Amino acid sequence: MNVNYSNNNTEESACKVTDTICLPDSDLPRVVIIGGGFAGLALTEKLKHKEIQVILIDKNNFHQFQPLLYQVATSALEPDSIVFPFRKQFNGYKNVVFRLAEVEEIQASSNIIVTDKGTVEYDYLVLATGTTTNFFGVENVEQNSLGMKDIRDSLNIRHLMLQNLEQAAITCDDDERDALTNFVIVGGGPAGVEMAGALAEFCKYILPKDYPEYPSSIMKIYLIEAIDELLSTMSEKASTKTLKYLKDLDVKVLFNESVSDYDGSIVTTKSGKTIFAKNLIWTAGVKGQFPKGIDEKHVVKGNRIRTGSFLMVEGYENIFAIGDIAAIITNETPKGHPQVAQTAIQQGKYLGNSLLKIINDEAVKPFEYKDKGSLATVGKRKAVADLGKFKFAGYFAWLLWSIVHLMSISGFRNRLMVGFNWAVSYFTYEKSNRLIIRNFKPKSSVNNPKK
Amino acid sequence: MNVNYSNNNTEESACKVTDTICLPDSDLPRVVIIGGGFAGLALTEKLKHKEIQVILIDKNNFHQFQPLLYQVATSALEPDSIVFPFRKQFNGYKNVVFRLAEVEEIQASSNIIVTDKGTVEYDYLVLATGTTTNFFGVENVEQNSLGMKDIRDSLNIRHLMLQNLEQAAITCDDDERDALTNFVIVGGGPAGVEMAGALAEFCKYILPKDYPEYPSSIMKIYLIEAIDELLSTMSEKASTKTLKYLKDLDVKVLFNESVSDYDGSIVTTKSGKTIFAKNLIWTAGVKGQFPKGIDEKHVVKGNRIRTGSFLMVEGYENIFAIGDIAAIITNETPKGHPQVAQTAIQQGKYLGNSLLKIINDEAVKPFEYKDKGSLATVGKRKAVADLGKFKFAGYFAWLLWSIVHLMSISGFRNRLMVGFNWAVSYFTYEKSNRLIIRNFKPKSSVNNPKK
């Protein structure tokens, strides 16, 4: 048992940002990786058991499998099935250290990063900080709608949705009930399409059982897309099939539309339409996020960091960027590479190999992207696939989508969980428990509890 | 799509407490049950498919299996395994209606309850609102420690524990690391004993793998009990065996001790000892919780409601209390019945049967409690059991404990989940994912982020 001594003493020492974060002593070159998404994790895996000290810093203690966030949002999966703790991942990696902290600033001149928990020195720094939701400056939308970029977003969507469905059972006001049960999804990319499909499934199979109070027709789902096609990065076949699948599920798709205003109850579109909905999910855009300290002149469109084809940030000797925030801008890739998992994973693996060479003063080849194709699913047993010249849709595409995603999830237990849940819902149309564990309100309503 | 109309209109109509909560029309007598714990759920099950309209009101949309809260707190189980949504439970119960609301007041004179979402009329009212943590007025302890009475408490404990373990890896201050990795559990009843055992297991099997930074000896677990034995409601054999099991797991048990002060870092005991710990879990007492409106003179020790042996609240014709808040005080039960699940379930079933009789003007028998015995587990493969004159401990008791609890959980899926997780951890000592999904701070530290 401890002897009694001053408490201030510890209060003093409790994480002042001037402190240095405690790390194991090592004479090895130190690579500090900020962010454990697909890119950061792939890089760490490449560097494990090597003559390098690897420090992974993330604001979460887990890796997230973002492609399935929409299934957590719609209660198809529980969060613990698609997130995996770094420390479990790194069991037995003697040269890898995880620290839970949020990086606030890069001091490149002195090779130091400043976090909310203290400072860390680096020999090589890798930014793998990914993207966040981009509301394109529409303040009201940002205040009243929900993005879907991490596990907390998914849980917020789930909780808001379930709370609104409960409130719809309580209210005697038809208009309010209508607003509470209408869903608007903005953005016709994979996230928006998959979210719309999953919501439509929920409406079709869960709502009638859980809410006998009202017909499933009461829940309306709108998908708003700024241009005239869905999944614009995929083939025309994929986008037309996707539209058909969504229509079969009664999703109302609005093309060439965008949201000009939203007050938490009424969505106003550019063309002047209004949709009455208390559920607005925003998947229309992302922007890079990274700590301050990187010279502005290297930041390009979408708040991404311009790198050379070796993924080194221009103007720095020992700072690299990988994944969604990295933009290798060449004639072949004027917009950089697509901001998807496979780019991130390939860049993580590439940098792992080239860092080992760089540290040993060996020559490195530039990064080359291999497009392995795209998959997107629309509700149960339907998906679209573009694999090189093979473009197909339907049940087989869905089966492929399921296998690819199941195999990509970290951790045997998670695969088992996801597989189990999918199997149950495949045969029974039953989904996992629908729990409101935290009461969620959009940002705005903190000051306006009525909303 | 909705036509455009005033937003204020809905804002106005959004849940004013003067509104009535929307309910299906019915000529049947209406029984309103407040609280869907063991008692409320057992009552609802008895009344399903009967000529009665049953309204269950709960502030959560799920039933909680409280006996396993400590396993969620220690990352052995995920929350969705031990909570079960009411609407799923009530699928196909045509006469049962669930409403998510928090009851604020009972207006007995007019047979109305007032909730945060609106009012509800009743013919018969049943209070099954259970208990909450009792800090016995020690303000500092209440501000800085964590209770363990519902699923949010468990998640708070889990998140605080994991955050503190991460901070322990970050700090270079030995004293702070010590405080961050020390755990104090107050209360030697089943909850405290099972929590201490589970923490000790975590320390023994998870910590060394996840936190190679430091030896498992760094995590110290203290159990503080006010009298001179553990599990005082069970047999002497049970309490001595439990003590042995905990000592085998290196839990430091302090008898005849209580906590006089806690500032979030230093626990001060009545006898003047100090323990340096940032993790204090309080299981030392409970008190009844129920909405205002019940005549004070019927409220007895532990904030329970005195009822006759028919569980009718004294002084009222159509208000009943069941479960932890009900106290039938007679010569045989001067303190009322034990506040445990089996009492709640028996009272729920009893009241279901007698309400049917009361509504049909038939005579009812008084409630009779059948003690089915007690079980408590201490870490893996060890438990104590008092079944009538059969008192035993060890592996078989643990097996019995596992089976009894597995069978008592609502929902096939939940049983499968819990069974699966237990099986995995039985063979591998591996537990489920350890995720910090929400950043938790004790109440006090909201104003003092350093704590």
Image: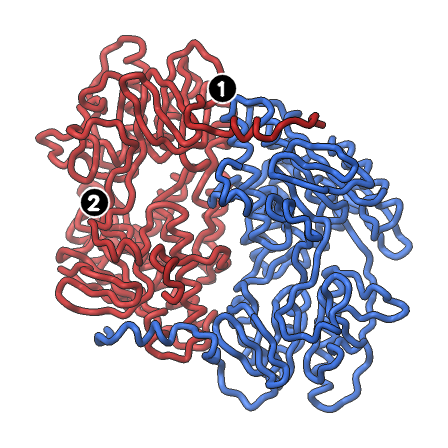
Chain colours: A blue, B red
Which chain letter matches label 2?
Answer: B
For marks 2 and 1, the one nearer the N-term is 1
Above or below — where is A13 with respect to A172? below
B66 versus B27 height, above or below = below
Neighbourhood count class around disc 1 (C-alpha, 10 Å): few under 14, some 14–19, many 20 upward: few
* Residue displayed at 82% across by 41% down: A256
| Residue B403 visible in the picture | no
Secondary structure at badge 1 equals loop
A12 vs A111, left or right, is: left
- How far across and down, in percent of the image, does residue B244 sit? 22, 62
| Amino acid type for the residue under numbered disc 2 | Phe
Q: Percent from the top left, x then y, of residue B360? A: 31, 9
Residue A357 image-quadrant placement? bottom right
Residue B293's tag is none
Which residue is the site of mark 1?
A: B94
Q: How many marks?
A: 2
In the drawing, what numbered circle is on residue B390? 2
